[in-house]
Amino acid sequence: MPERVLAKVWAYFDAAGPLVGRAWPITYREEEERRIELLRGFGVRAFTSMLYPHKPGMARWLNDWAADFAARVPDCLHTATFFAEPGASDDVRHALDQGARVFKCHLQVGGYDPNDPLLDDVWGQLADSGTPVVTHCGSGPVPGAFTGPGPIGELLKRHPRLRLVVAHLGMPEYEGFLDLAERHEDVMLDTTMAFTPFVEASDPFPPAALPRLAALRDRVLLGTDFPNIPYSYADALHALERTGLGDDWLRAVCHDNAARLFGL
């Protein structure tokens, strides 16, 4: 994120703000260049820059920053975002024209309904272009006005070809979002924070649902929320190993699926 935005995000986490709800120390509180070095040192071949506005008028300049960042950091997949506002359609068209390859939609922070008519053309553009949209739509760590599988289910009825990536496996409504992924072949899930002791203490993944997650092996992507995590990057990977889903599942999640999705 732009440094001044990231500083505000860190301050929000430090204060355990209402959307955080608990103590949340930032493990990788480093300058931008050092963060990039760390990712490369972890063996990360490609990563995103997950931006999200919390009010109108932010998306365009966030997207312009992200375009510049991706141009100067070639391992970054050019990422963009949007907000439910009158200019949303133009913002998304502009970002796609700039070369955006993935979008971030944060319903908890943004506090908007994914079915807002202001976004109808946005979803249409993203579905038509086949651009993945990583969406924080689960109700963790605290519920939002439009989180949960219900609003996303309604969205997918209108835009069934949308390539939606449900962040955090849809925590804590894991099974509801597994239902959506099983019904819609273009819906994917990411593993951000899932299975870590930090999350398992409050929102454990139901063991009985592990076979369903195993069956969706080709549509699960590694997510980490680096650098804004309260544990080490390695801890997140060890947590995935502890699922017992096996090396083939891990290889698909940590490499093959994203490599195929983004043509890497």
Image (spheres, rainbow, N blue to C red):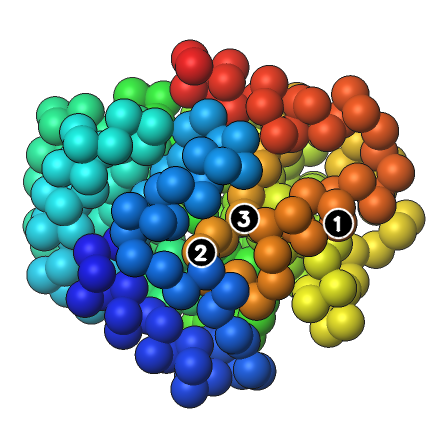
Q: Residue at x 27, y 73 (%)?
A: 8
Left or right? Give the position of 257 relative to 110.
right
- The percent coordinates of residue 193 (x first, y second) are 62, 55
Q: Is residue 44 above or below residue 190?
A: above
- The percent coordinates of residue 169 (x first, y second) are 63, 48
- Mark 3 lies on a secondary structure that is loop
- The percent coordinates of residue 227 (x first, y second) are 44, 56
Is residue 50 visible to us here?
A: no
Left or right? Give the position of 27 relative to 5.
right
Q: Which residue is mark 2?
A: 227
Three-letter residue code for mark 3: Thr
Do the residues under discs 3 and 2 have CB atoms within 8 angstroms? Answer: no
Three-letter residue code for mark 2: Pro
Q: Is residue 27 above or below residue 87?
A: below
Quarter in which the N terminus is drawn = bottom left
User: In front of the other: label 3 or label 2?
Assistant: 2
Q: CA distance from mark 3 to mark 2?
A: 8 Å
Q: CA distance from mark 1 to mark 2?
A: 17 Å
Q: Which residue is mark 3?
A: 224
